[in-house]
Amino acid sequence: MIAKEDGHLIILGCGDVGKYVVQTLQHSGLKFIAVDSDPKAFDNAGYEYVIGNATDEDVLKQAGIETASTIIVALNTDTDVIFATLIARGLNPKSTILARANSYRSIDKVYKAGADYVAALSIVAGQILAKMTSRCLETSCRRMDEDIMLYEGIDIEKHTVTNEADIVNRAVADIGLRERFGCTLIGIEREGKIITDILPSTVILRDDIIAVVGTKQEISLFKDKYVK
């Protein structure tokens, strides 16, 4: 049985983004219930959860959607994000809904579905990289040494790819950052241009400045293998 309480939080989707939301909420000691259709997402889970489709009204009710104070929609496809947001808003008009948009083209649709705030991952990554570039220009540095902490335990680090690095001229899919280390490549600065639309086929070149997000341990594993 789910011990639903008025004012709890609900996370819809425990994939590449949702799992970090869950980790942060656990660390903060906040009351929440997670929803995902994949039972493996809850292996060794030390929190309450519901296994089911986050776009199913009955599943959302089981998670206590009608009394939740905040709903975080972190599903992997924008179609599901829009549909889940629409249903959640209908079931709980007073809640605060924070939603992920995988493409900037979906932002308006997610807002129209009822979200209070929409975070487009590509835009957030672009803003961070632009801020990093601005800091570098202000200090006339050739390389940017400061790191950015998103929240406790989750960092963005950037590294200049040297000719000696094992990742030069290799596609993102071949490197397998997420599969091998758990971290994610979120952006590349190349010849003054910012690339945030990172595809599996994207090739990393010499002198690229890459931005990697993950825990300190995940990034450390990546650096031990690939950063010279």
Image (cartoon, helix red, strand yellow):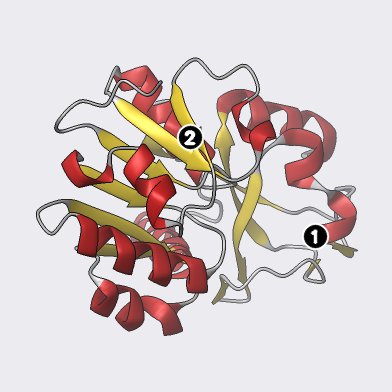
Residue closest to the eye, 39 or 149 = 39
Is 58 positioned to the left or the right of 40 in the image? left
Q: Which residue is mark 2?
A: 50
Q: Nearer the viewer, residue 212 or 206?
A: 212
Q: Position of residue 148 (x, y in %)?
A: 42, 41
Q: Is residue 121 left or right of residue 39?
A: left
Identity of the amino acid at label 2? Val
Q: Residue at x 28, y 74 (%)?
A: 113
Choose top left, top right, bottom left or bottom right for residue 172: bottom right
- Between circles 1 and 2, the one closer to the viewer is 2
User: At 20% from the left edge and 46% from the top edge, which residue is drawn?
Assistant: 66
33 vs 59, nearest the viewer: 59
Q: Report x, y in % for residue 30.
A: 27, 23
Q: Position of residue 130 (x, y in %)?
A: 41, 66
Residue hosting label 1:
172
Element type at mark 2: strand
Crowd class of label 2 (few under 14; some 14 to 19; many from 20; radius 10 Å): many
Above or below residue 194? Residue 47 is: above
What percent of the width, then of the height, locates residue 193? 56, 78
Locate residue 120: give its quadrant: bottom left
What secondary structure is marked by label 1? helix
Is residue 91 shown left or right of residue 135? left
Q: Callout 1, which amino acid?
A: Val
Label 1 crowd bin: few (<14), some (14–19), many (20+), radius 10 Å: some
Q: Quadrant of the C terminus?
A: top right
Q: Work out which quarter of the rendered image holds the N terminus and state it.
A: top left
**Which residue: 63% across, 23% down?**
217
In the rendered image of this protein, does residue 184 appear above or below residue 173?
Answer: above
Q: If you read the primary sequence from the N terminus, does the residue marked by circle 1 or circle 2 appear first?
A: 2
Can residue 155 be seen here? The reply is no
